[in-house]
Image: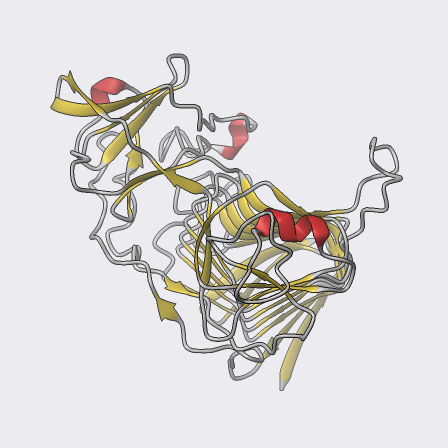
Amino acid sequence: MMTQSFRGPVRTRTRFLAASLLVAAPFFSIASCQAQNAPNAQAPNDEVKDQGNVAPRVGTMTGYPAEAPVTVPLARSNYPVPRDAIFVAPDGRDTNAGASIAAPTTLARALEIAPVNSTIVLRGGVYRAGTLSLKRKLTIQAYPEESPLLLGSIVVEGWVPDTNANGRVWRRDGWKGEFPNQLNPRFVDVKKNPLAANRDMTFVDGRPLWQVGSLAEVRPGAFFVDYAGDKLYIGDDPAGKVVESTTHGVAFTLARPRPSDPDSGAGIDPAGSVVRGLSFGRYANQGVILARANGVLLENNAFFWNGQMGAAVHESADVVLRGNRFTCNGRSSLSGNDATRMLLENNTFSYSNIEGYSTSWDAAGVKLTRSNTMIWRCSHSYRRARPRLN
């Protein structure tokens, strides 16, 4: 094995496996080796159907890359199930304790009742859930050879016809799933996509629509959110189709409170938790965010079409990301700040910064700042249809 190490508190650009990684770290190590699957990984289960590509947007970016995948292979694994596992299913009930496969509980309820060091097992299927917290050391994993899919979107119904200068459009009144830009203007490249930081997302039969800034711009392949009027517009006829829009910012938060936080004395500490074999998509911000959560393992997960990044690691030490696949995430695949001794192993990062954020400020495939003793091993970045990994 060949290892290259770079020392010094300077920004160091390193090319590896046809990718570049921009890091600000006192110690950063890149190890070259043959890529291999993480333990218990199975062949991907392709459950998200390909519905074609997105119509271009006139004026700034031309829209999402034509070759960007709408078909996304879901995570699949084969982890052993402990005898005392808590079982969860999409049709689970809060009144169940999840003690058996025949009587599963809900994901939210499982997170409430699971004792420290226990394992929560998710059956396959779609979980439209978000804003969930791991408050103690837990393992959350997929049932063997099944593919749980966590989505931050809901199915939107109740459309009424409307019109604009381009012809017929469709409107959903009373829309509350709104994610306007709340970032520093430096994050946005107005020449590429002035709406990159508006994290609203809408899909028609799985195909992502391009967000525009006014009702007048709506046409097939595009959508508009009227924040002041609480209205959602699309240019595609919803009849006979499944229309989904994002309503959750994040799926899982693993965070130990700061001493100054009101709940700092509540004993919340997810250190050592494990999340494996799950798929996260269509969240406005991230699939998973870690904050002051040491020793967490993210393994054999898939992160796709999330508004900002697939996962974020902040103020955490000894975090391991192994065998994960990141595809078509809005700003970056993975971000890290003050992430000490983080190991990135056997991961893939593709179509990062799909929304066209400014690469001169923050957007990247993997963005690491104020972090040290990093190891990048057998991880690949490819298909950089939007900015290269910086």
Q: Is residue 153 above or below residue 262?
A: below
Q: Is residue 142 above or below residue 245?
A: below
Q: Position of residue 244 (x, y in %)?
A: 33, 39
Residue 184's quadrant in the figure? top right
Residue found at x 83% / y 39% = 258
259 sits left or right of 375 in the view = right
Q: Quadrant of the N terminus?
A: bottom right
Residue found at x 67% / y 75% = 83
Q: Is residue 149 above or below residue 379?
A: above
Residue 172's quadrant in the figure? top left
Q: Position of residue 141 (x, y in %)?
A: 59, 66
Counting labels gives 0
Q: Nearer the viewer, residue 49 or 310?
A: 49
Q: Nearer the viewer, residue 27 or 308?
A: 308
Residue 313 seen:
no
312 sits left or right of 269 in the view = left
Colour convention: secondary structure
Furthest residue toward top: 228
261 sits left or right of 218 in the view = right
Residue 271 seen:
yes
Q: Nearer the viewer, residue 364 or 126?
A: 126
Q: Nearer the viewer, residue 168 or 145?
A: 145
Q: Position of residue 322 (x, y in %)?
A: 59, 70
Q: Is residue 153 above or below residue 383?
A: above
Q: Position of residue 218 (x, y in %)?
A: 22, 26
Residue found at x 54% / y 43% = 130
